[in-house]
Each structure stands twice: as structure tokens, then as C-alpha cells.
Image (tube, helix red, strand yellow):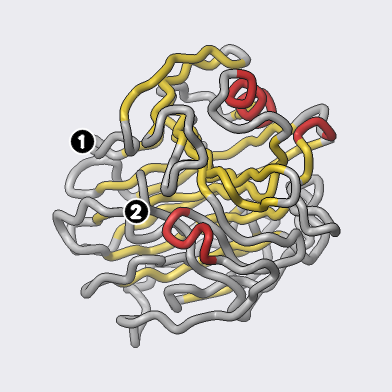
Amino acid sequence: MGSRLIAAVAAALAVAGTAVSVTVADSASSAPGLSTRAHRAAVAAHSHTVTTRPGAPTTPATVPTVTTPAGAAAEPAVIAAADGSTTPYDYAGITTSNGRDTYVINNVWRPVPGWNQTLYAWNPGNWYVVANMPAGNTDVLSYPCTQQYYTTAENTPAPLSDFTSISSTYAVTYSSLAAPNDAEAAYDIWTGVGSSNFTQEIMIWNSNQTTPGLPPAGTVVDNAAIDGTAYQVWSTSGKDQNAAGGTITLLSSSTSQDVNILADLLWLEAHGYIPPGSGLNQINYGWEIRSTGGRDQKFGVTGFTISSS
């Protein structure tokens, strides 16, 4: 996956399977917007500036019939801007959500010619995008996702040692997992050490992947069994997470919709893939989209939760 991911933040308006990756980004639990591979070190602490991206669509993708999820707001937030974000949510499905640090973002961070993507978000647990990405493209162009910040009030990663549990559930919807679509549902988790925020990116790839599709970036460097789930461990830089652009991905074919995020992170820490004393900055969940064959396709998340203590 090398250089993919988030590059969006604050606009205005306003759940699965398993695998993992690591990178850098923003730094504030109250900061809206995103963080992920492409601009990891480039995201300044508490920087909420929205930069207009070239090639932004002038009209949204074709809008399908909109069905309101049970228990959701009657009307979704509709966001077509590449770097568009909902306003923050106070979402009961995420333990630490407080109305300042939970977002859903459109996050087209590589807006190549011909892209089009519109986000329809009722809340962080129920949303989808209609995406139209060029046929044959093999780079990640967008990562629409739910985004939850954990950076502390002191602007440091929340130590993993402070948690007794971090678990997540999800379910996804999609038009098709067959070619020419190329996409996968995944967690994108950012950790740091000490006063350094967003210094590692860890992805967890779920079983919801298009076939055929591209594998994670790097090579298989290990195998793991964590809390009953078998993973291949992929890395672009071995155990050297100080390497620029390094990404760790936990890849699983499990169809379980329950993920023990804390157990995954502690395994990576114990085996040297992330540094000792690591802390949590951000958990994201959504779809990495490369291609839809040049046609409108839907990718969504339903019932997404994060429980922590």
C-alpha cells in the first residue's frame, strides 16, 4: 500500500472482515479531518485547513435511490468535495466519541482525471459513497472512512498501556467485489511514541476485497494468530518503522465482523513491528478504492462501532 490514504479534513454538513497497516498523520483528538499515508508527516498538529484539490468534480456522481438506515437521521450529509468532511459527531457507537473527534470523510486524496465520488453519511456507523474511478487504475485514489481521534489533550498519543480493551465491529455494503472493481475494506490505524504523533500506520485488511485485486504493499514477513484470527503480516520495511513510507498490514481471510484492535497492536509491539511504549492517535475504517471500471459503484459501511476501556 505504500503511499496511500487520507488527506482530507473539515468541510461542513452533518460499519466488516480483517487485515492491518501502519503510517503517520495529524495530531489532535479534537482535530477534524484526516491522516494517512500520502501526507503522513506533512499534516501539522491541529491544522484544520482545507486545501482545494485540483480536478475537484463540478457535479456529484449519479445519485442512487437513497434509503435511510433504521434509526438514522432522515437526511444524510451529502459531500462531493475531494477533501470534504462531515461536521463532528457525538456517536454512541464509539465509546470515546464526544462531538469533537469523530468524523466521516470523503477523502479522495489522489484526484486523478476522471474521478468522481460522493459521500452520503447518516452517522459514523452508516454511510456509503458512490464512486466512479478510471478503469485499470492500480493506485489507491480514495479512502472514504469513519475517523476517530485518540490524541490526548496534551497532544500526545494515548498510551496503549492505558487501555484494557479496544474492539470494533463492522459490516459493509458494495455494488460488486468482482472485476473491474478494485477495492478493499480496511482499518487504517495511526500510532505514535512519546510526544511524536502519527509515526506508524497500521492497516487491517478485512475479507471484503475485490477479486482479483492487488495485495498489500511490501512482502509477507510473518504470520500471526491473534485472539483466534490468523493473519499474514505484510511490511514495506521489515521491522524498521522509522523508514520513510513504512507500512504494516495485517491481512486476514476471516469473515468475522469483530476485531480485537488492542490485541493486534500489542502483538505488533511485542514482535518489534511498532516501537515499545506506542500510543494511539487515530482509528479509521472505510474503503480503499482504486478503480470502478469507469462506472458508478457503491461502497458503504453499516453498524460500525469501536468499544474501548
Task: Tell me if residue 15 can be seen.
Answer: no
Q: Position of residue 135 (x, y in %)?
A: 15, 58
Q: Is residue 195 left or right of residue 251?
A: right
Q: Which residue is mark 2?
A: 289
Q: The C terminus lies in which quarter of the figure?
A: top right
Type of residue at label 1? Pro
Q: What's the CA distance linking mark 1 and mark 2? A: 14 Å
Instruction: Count up the numbered dots.
Output: 2
Number of other residues with Cα within 10 Å of mark 2, as a class: few under 14, some 14 to 19, many 20 or more: many
Amino acid type, residue under disc 2 in the picture? Ile
The residue where tag 1 is placed is 212
Q: Position of residue 286 (x, y in %)?
A: 50, 50
Which of 116/51 is in front? 51
Q: Secondary structure at mark 2?
A: strand
Determine contact: label 1, label 2, CB under 8 Å. Answer: no
Q: Which label is found at residue 28?
A: none
Tell me which corner region of the image, top left, top right, bottom left or bottom right, holds residue 208: top left
Q: Residue furthest left?
A: 136
The spot of residue 216 in percent (x, y) is 34, 36
Q: Name the residue located 43 percent from the left edge and 50 percent from the top edge.
A: 287
| Quarter of the image that includes the N terminus | top left
- Using the image as rendered, state which of residue 306 and residue 46 is in the foreground: 46
